[in-house]
Image: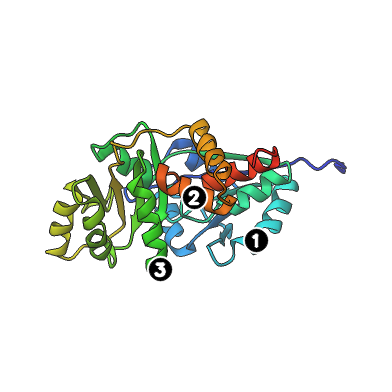
Amino acid sequence: MENSEITAGQLVLVATPLGNLGDISRRALELLESADVIYCEDTRRSSTLFSAHRIAVNGRLRALHEHNEASLCDQVVAQVASGQTVVVISDAGTPGISDPGARVAAAVADAGLLVTTAPGPSAVVAALTISGLSTERFAMEGFVPRKSGEREALYAQWMHEPRTIVFFESPQRLAATLNEMVGRFGARRACVARELTKLHEEVLRGTVEEIATLVNAREVLGEIVVVLEGNTEVEVVDDELIRAALRDQVDAGASTRDAVSFVAESLGVAHRVVYQMALALRADDAL
């Protein structure tokens, strides 16, 4: 009997182990066994996970990485719309967190189709929770920029950031990054978590200066997450204070651009945040 109706499927972002292959949920394994299509960063690395849990691949693996994710969005939307269960995994951890997955998730959601998750391992959360630093509020920064100017801009924001900061760094650049940070955050507490859940897991805790000294003295290998203490001396700036400061600057004759720059620097608030408020105020004829 011919079925004239098309039943929409689902896109599932499935978290996979950071290193220890036992760190995967029963539901995640069931999804990997039953999915129609599975997109992964590296089919060879993902095959290791499948083999360890005796899951047949049966030609279901497709490569989805930073270079082709945008071009695959329409294909994934069509697969989900046709009723398929499509799974996205990364090499390790949660897809979409400094790994592919966010673009296709947005595309499927924008198409009005089901996007869900089988939550689990996350290097960000794992490092944060064992760092010994505050976990109440934190900011995830991804990988530190390679260009010096972009790094300087980021460090300037961190000077005033009250939240705990989490970021990734490559082992080849870790020492250089920590050395740059010493002059700005040398006394702040930090944690470098290396090879989480793996055989050679290592966690370094101390001030930025202390950890930089340790890293400079030896070779560091593996996947790395850095957790940096926020500026605990910064007074939280609310939106009304920012708006009032913008009005004061404009009333004094400053242009919107100059007002934004002055307020952002003086209050230690990200330039983009102040700029958006300035646009909103100008739209309300307040500027």
Q: Which mark is residue 188?
A: none
Name the amino acid, label 3. Lys
How crowded is the residue under tag 1: few (<14 C-alpha within 10 Å), some, or many (20+)?
A: some
CB contact under 8 Å: marks 3 and 2 = no
Asked if one can make out residue 15 in the rendered structure from this viewpoint, the answer is yes
Please tell me which residue lies in front, 161 or 116. Answer: 161
- Report the mark closest to the observer, 3 or 1: 3
Residue that carries the numbered disc 1 in the rendered image:
72
Question: Where residue 87 sits in the image (x, y, percent)?
Answer: 57, 48
The answer for how far apart the CA atoms under marks 3 and 1 are is 29 Å
Secondary element at image label 2: helix
The reply, left or right, for residue 128 in relation to residue 281 is left
The answer for how far apart the CA atoms under marks 1 and 2 are is 34 Å
Residue ID at (58%, 52%): 255
Residue that carries the numbered disc 3 in the rendered image:
147
Residue that carries the numbered disc 2 in the rendered image:
271
Please tell me which residue lies in front, 270 or 66. Answer: 270
Residue ID at (21%, 62%): 220
Quadrant of the rendered image containing residue 6: top right
The answer for how far apart the CA atoms under marks 3 and 2 are is 19 Å
Question: Where residue 95 sits in the image (x, y, percent)?
Answer: 49, 49
Mark 1 or mark 2, earlier in chain: 1
Secondary element at image label 1: helix
The reply, left or right, for residue 5 in relation to residue 79 is right
Question: Where residue 86 sits in the image (x, y, percent)?
Answer: 62, 49
- Report the mark closest to the observer, 1 or 2: 2
- Report the mark closest to the observer, 3 or 2: 2
Asked if one can make out residue 10 in the rendered structure from this viewpoint, the answer is no
Mark 3 or mark 2, earlier in chain: 3
Name the amino acid, label 2. His
